[in-house]
């Protein structure tokens, strides 16, 4: 009897798990996407690419793809520099820095939907605290829920409030683990603080920054919680994840929903590959 | 309306607390609790306290019927202020008939003592069924398990359980508009009703029509019977020298007059019930569109959708919908039921259309800033504003308690659904402001009940003219409402400048779904959509005041 | 001309004294070693000179100018770190060029300077490599090149050889000494190793617990330490210390130790009879013989119980009358079992310290 490779033997549970919870549903979803298939209707018809054609010609799909990228870009553009700034501030030694580092981590620990609800309470017309200050300062009641730009601002605020600390904490960890001497050496060598930051600090934490950015970008492309809470997907704020939820799960249309999911997967796959390839050398 | 249950009596108070405290921890804790659904634990505590109350009061009024102590009664449910407000004699029943009182519970107990029945409830807060849980357990000797499911996922969850045939729930709350999707998995409850002498015809046809099958089979007991009314704060209208509007034109005129006054005093002329993209848009527009019924959106000849209307009544309704948003608090275009209710109870509006719960909850001094019991507010409840002809409010959001075919406790489940939704208990739920409303003719026509739920008078007077979407009779209802709503929404948010074009796009989307599902080919005529027509077709009496 | 004057510098870290009122003058074009054990305050002193640490008290003058409040970049000092402190993401060339770029020199100037310095340090082949591709010795050369590439008034070297292995360290000592001459640079070199100072330094400052104990020409400090602490720490293997008592007999003054007795009449004015002292004699001032020979030296018998051969030399550990003695002999000495020997030394090399103050008396 041939001996089983122990490596293979130990991988079997994982492989089984992956098969049943990843590969099989994935392939099943592709199969579903080529059918007219609603859960309450026993008649399942093969319709080829019709679902895909419908999805691609749908305004909502294009709008939600735009919204997903839009929020990814603005949230990332705010969160990374802000997180880096906070990380640099917190990497210095000052009184109470320990407490500050703990406080800054609190938003990450909160449930995303809870964060969104908290911000919604703060921005309710006439009832929320932010609206109160807005009126006191003479800006009147702000349409945070119905206007695309203002709703997007609120969504950005929610996401930045919750996830900027993620950048801050990870980059802080990278910063404090850097050796002190190269900084001093650079200072003694006559480099300005700006030069020290751009020429030494940034390149030193670049690998960490790239990895955390890729994670965050892929996460942002899945943004859904604040959208459900703030607009329920209205006023042009619907993202791809929210769109899939609306067209797949509520009408139980797993054919059409499957098609959107497949397109979404392709999009994510391509993007993730581009990002990883582009920054491969940096990470290594 | 049923969706209301999750917030009900504690809603407003806890909201104010949360809004006042900016501490993140409080909210985290609250939300975590909400999401984690503590279920069993909370359930146990509540049961214990309620049981004590019931036992305590039972000793006060012993009666000849050994089970009387378990019957729902005002003094066991209502708060002190409610009893005072209504002026009821707390030891008397408020309804004349109650099918629970005619069932032989002794027999039931000997048959089912020690057995278990399960129920899937909408909402994580399941306190409405919990109110009646100890009574039912006492009266039947059986034990009842309640499973709260968040409203956002209830539909998918139930469909998954039913299609998979798990038999996990013996009874489940089914949303009226989408009830037909559940139909193949539910039993007809009429045989049980006959066995126990339960008169299901006491349920108003307006609320029964949507869950009745082609051969008269009944999907479940009506649990929450919703119908729109027009509500206003008469004191604000009086101050502006306005009469209570009866038509949509008058509503818009009144809004125009009220707008500058409200701007000064910190309120808005109108509160939007719900409008968010998707089926909520479709519903809100639909309730207005149905007032232009000669050109109705739901008149389907051989399933051809006609949203624009022969005389463009649908277009007019959509324009009104958009206009109303201008008179509502900013952001109302994406309003959900919950947000609209908060705004109304916080006194942010002068007028609104809503289900029965808003006017009733307006009176609750703990929930409402505009309670007439605390302020000089006057709440008026009137029929839905008219369009071109006579009006007919919508009844799409009625909820049923259905019994799946896979249930192994069908009879016990039926008894529970009857107990929980008897005339007396449903009257008490309505009058207690839970948002669960009665659909019994004997209840809504009872002037004694009107003292506890003032909206019922209006409901009783208008229910005979009610209508429903044709789509609620097919499983694709949700998909249709969602798709049509998304198209109509484009006019509201301005991405489609023409109301007519938006409605035509919606027609095209709906046609696509109907075509895919095969309705356009079969040639089957759609079922009637007004209560009047439905009653004629089913040989039923349409109860009129 | 570079003269660095350190005046009454004190520094505390979280209440712990790192430097206590240190004053010294670093002379132009000399190789000065700050010597002391770990925690003596050497690194802190260098960091204060460089300007990356602020003194609590005191002043620093460079060429007569008060630079105490100057930022590091305005002081024109260069520093080399024990950990090399190279920038890991830059090539060797960029590392060396960085200080020049910070001073906004032109590309051709930078190129010339980098090539020149790397040639003289023998690292031309390494210019395109990254620090992670260098050996310890190479990395240290690059670090030194990075500081020498600048025309600094003072070059500060903080234990630059500590992280290198023994052999490379030997070689680098030679080179550093040579470099100091070739570049006519003013070097301040912190080290915990007396050999560094002895091998390279023109002048040495001995520090302990934040205090400057002695500062002067290296040989002066070595042969005439101010006190018993300097004598003990500056020198390897450590000096032998014995208890002693002065006794007067027949007009002569003797020092009596457990091991020997020696006539110290010529120091009569400085020593008091019947008083306890401590005497020290450096291990390489001791000689051993297996047979007793008659010479004009102090001698006593001892038993060698351990030998340690270093290169061509031997350190012998011996015991005599319960006292441990270290002897450094300039040849390879192999022992077979315990060996009875006689130890000799010239009494002129004997250092006598006050028992209580530790100060050198003779």
Image (cartoon, grey):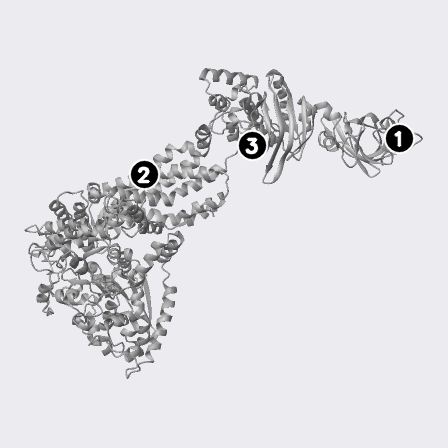
Residue ID at (17%, 57%):
B239
**In this rendering, which labeled residue sits more in front, label 3 or label 2?**
3
Residue ID at (35%, 38%):
A78
Q: Position of residue A167 (x, y in %)?
A: 41, 40
* Residue under disc 3 on the same chain as residue under disc 2: no
Q: Quadrant of the C terminus of chain C?
A: top right
Question: How far separated are the C-alphas under marks 3 and 2?
Answer: 42 Å
**Residue picked out by circle 1:** C253
**Residue picked out by circle 2:** A74
Question: How far separated are the C-alphas under marks 3 and 1?
Answer: 52 Å
The subunit letter for the residue under badge 3 reads: C
Tell me where residue C163 sits by quadrant: top right
Q: Name the secondary structure under disc 3.
A: loop
The subunit letter for the residue under badge 1 reads: C
Q: Position of residue B103 (x, y in %)?
A: 24, 78
A6 left or right of B484 in image: right
Dot label at residue B405: none
**Residue picked out by circle 3:** C54
């Amino acid at each position: 009897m041939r001996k089983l490779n122990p490596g293979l033997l130990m991988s079997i549970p994982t492989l089984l798990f992956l098969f049943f919870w990843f590969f099989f549903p994935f392939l099943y979803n592709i199969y579903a996407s080529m059918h007219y298939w609603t859960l309450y209707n026993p008649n399942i018809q093969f319709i080829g690419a019709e679902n895909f054609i419908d999805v691609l010609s749908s305004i909502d799909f294009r709008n939600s793809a735009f919204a997903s990228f839009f929020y990814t870009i603005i949230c990332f553009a705010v969160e990374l520099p802000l997180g880096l700034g906070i990380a640099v501030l917190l990497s210095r030694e000052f009184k109470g820095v320990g407490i500050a580092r703990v406080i800054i981590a609190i938003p990450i620990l909160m449930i995303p939907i809870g964060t969104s609800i908290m911000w919604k309470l703060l921005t309710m017309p006439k009832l929320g605290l932010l609206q109160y200050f807005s009126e006191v300062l003479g800006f009147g009641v702000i349409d945070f829920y119905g206007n695309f730009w203002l709703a997007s601002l609120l969504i950005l605020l929610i996401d930045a409030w919750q996830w900027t600390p993620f950048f801050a904490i990870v980059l802080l960890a990278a910063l404090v683990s850097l050796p002190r001497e190269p900084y001093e050496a650079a200072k003694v060598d006559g480099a300005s603080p700006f030069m020290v930051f751009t020429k030494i600090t940034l390149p030193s934490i670049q690998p960490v920054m790239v990895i955390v950015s890729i994670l965050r970008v892929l996460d942002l492309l899945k943004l859904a919680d604040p959208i459900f809470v703030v607009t329920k997907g209205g006023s042009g704020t619907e993202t791809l994840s929210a769109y899939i939820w609306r067209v797949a799960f509520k009408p139980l249309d797993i054919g059409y929903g499957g098609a959107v999911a497949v397109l979404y997967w392709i999009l994510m796959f391509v993007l993730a590959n581009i990002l990883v390839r582009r920054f491969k050398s940096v990470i290594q | 309306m049923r969706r209301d249950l999750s917030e009900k009596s504690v809603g407003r108070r806890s909201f104010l607390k949360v809004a006042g405290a900016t501490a993140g921890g409080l909210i985290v804790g609250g939300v975590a609790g909400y999401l984690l659904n503590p279920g069993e634990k909370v359930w146990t505590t509540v049961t214990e306290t309620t049981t004590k109350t019931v036992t305590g009061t039972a000793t006060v009024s012993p009666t000849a019927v050994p089970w009387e102590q378990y019957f729902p009664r005002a003094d066991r449910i209502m708060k002190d202020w409610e009893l005072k407000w209504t002026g009821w004699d707390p030891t008397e029943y408020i309804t004349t008939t109650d099918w629970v009182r005619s069932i032989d519970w002794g027999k039931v107990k000997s048959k089912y003592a020690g057995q278990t029945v399960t129920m899937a409830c909408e909402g994580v807060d399941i306190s409405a069924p919990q109110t009646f849980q100890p009574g039912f357990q006492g009266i039947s000797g059986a034990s009842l398990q309640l499973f709260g499911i968040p409203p956002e996922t209830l539909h998918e969850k139930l469909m998954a359980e039913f299609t998979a045939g798990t038999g996990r729930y013996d009874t489940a709350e089914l949303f009226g508009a989408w009830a037909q999707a559940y139909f193949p998995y539910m039993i007809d409850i009429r045989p049980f009703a006959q066995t126990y002498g339960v008169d299901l015809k006491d349920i108003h046809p307006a609320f029964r029509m949507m869950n009745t099958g082609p051969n008269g089979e009944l999907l479940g007991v009506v649990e929450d019977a919703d119908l729109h009314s027009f509500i206003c704060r008469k004191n604000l209208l009086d101050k502006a020298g306005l009469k209570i509007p009866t038509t949509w034109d008058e509503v818009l005129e009144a809004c125009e007059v009220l707008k500058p006054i409200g701007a000064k005093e910190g309120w808005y002329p109108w509160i939007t019930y719900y409008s968010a993209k998707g089926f909520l848009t479709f519903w809100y527009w639909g309730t207005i569109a149905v007032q232009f019924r000669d050109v109705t959106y739901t008149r389907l000849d051989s399933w051809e959708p006609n949203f624009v209307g022969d005389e463009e009544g649908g277009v007019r309704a959509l324009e009104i919908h958009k206009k109303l948003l201008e008179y509502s608090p900013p952001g109302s275009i994406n309003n959900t039921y919950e947000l609209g209710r908060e705004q109304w109870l916080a006194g942010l509006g002068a007028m609104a259309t809503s289900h029965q719960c808003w006017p009733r909850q307006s009176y609750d001094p703990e929930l409402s800033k505009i309670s007439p019991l605390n302020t000089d507010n006057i709440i008026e409840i009137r029929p839905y504003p008219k369009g071109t002809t006579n009006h007919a409010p919508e009844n799409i959001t009625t909820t049923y308690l259905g019994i799946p075919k896979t249930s192994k406790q069908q009879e016990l489940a039926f008894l529970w659904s009857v107990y929980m939704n008897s005339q007396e208990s449903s009257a008490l739920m309505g009058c207690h402001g839970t948002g669960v409303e009665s659909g019994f003719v004997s209840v809504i026509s009872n002037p004694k009940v009107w003292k506890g739920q003032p909206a019922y008078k209006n409901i009783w007077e208008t229910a005979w003219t009610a209508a429903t979407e044709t789509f609620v009779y097919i499983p694709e209802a949700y998909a249709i409402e969602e798709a049509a709503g998304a198209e109509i929404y484009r006019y509201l948010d301005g991405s489609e400048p023409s109301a007519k074009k938006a409605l035509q796009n919606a027609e095209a989307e709906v046609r696509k779904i109907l075509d895919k599902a095969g309705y356009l080919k079969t040639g089957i005529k759609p079922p009637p959509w007004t209560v009047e027509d439905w009653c004629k077709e089913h040989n039923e009496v349409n109860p009129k005041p | 001309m570079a003269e660095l004057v350190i005046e009454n510098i004190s520094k505390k870290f979280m209440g712990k004294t790192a430097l206590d009122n240190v004053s010294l003058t670093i002379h132009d074009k000399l190789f000065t070693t700050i010597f002391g054990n770990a925690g003596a305050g050497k690194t802190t002193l260098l960091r204060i000179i460089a300007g990356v640490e602020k003194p609590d008290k005191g002043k620093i003058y460079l060429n007569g100018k008060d630079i105490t409040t100057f930022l590091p970049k305005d002081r024109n000092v260069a520093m080399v770190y024990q950990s090399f402190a190279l920038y890991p993401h830059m090539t060797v060339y960029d590392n060396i060029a960085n200080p020049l770029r910070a001073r906004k020199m032109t590309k051709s100037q930078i190129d010339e300077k980098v090539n020149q310095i790397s040639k003289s340090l023998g690292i031309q082949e390494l210019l395109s490599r990254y620090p992670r591709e260098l050996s310890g010795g190479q990395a240290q050369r690059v670090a030194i090149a990075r500081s020498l590439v600048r025309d600094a008034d003072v070059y500060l070297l903080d234990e630059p050889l500590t992280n290198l292995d023994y052999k490379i360290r030997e070689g680098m000592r030679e080179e550093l000494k040579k470099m100091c001459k070739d570049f006519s640079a003013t070097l301040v070199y912190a080290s915990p190793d007396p050999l560094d100072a002895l091998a390279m330094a023109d002048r040495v400052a001995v520090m302990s617990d934040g205090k400057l104990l002695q500062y002067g020409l290296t040989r002066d400090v070595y042969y005439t330490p101010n006190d018993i602490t300097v004598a003990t720490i500056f020198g390897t293997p450590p000096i032998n210390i014995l208890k002693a008592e002065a006794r007067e007999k027949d007009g002569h003054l003797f020092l009596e130790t457990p091991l020997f007795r020696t006539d110290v009449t010529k120091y009569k004015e400085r020593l008091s009879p019947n008083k306890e002292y401590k005497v020290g004699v450096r291990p390489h001032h001791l000689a051993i013989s297996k047979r007793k020979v008659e010479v004009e030296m102090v001698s006593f018998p001892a038993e060698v119980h351990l030998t340690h051969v270093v290169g061509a030399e031997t350190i012998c550990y011996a015991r005599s009358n319960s006292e441990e003695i270290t002897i450094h002999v300039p040849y390879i000495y192999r022992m077979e079992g315990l060996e009875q020997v006689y130890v000799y030394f010239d009494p002129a090399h004997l250092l006598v310290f006050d028992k209580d103050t530790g100060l050198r008396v003779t």
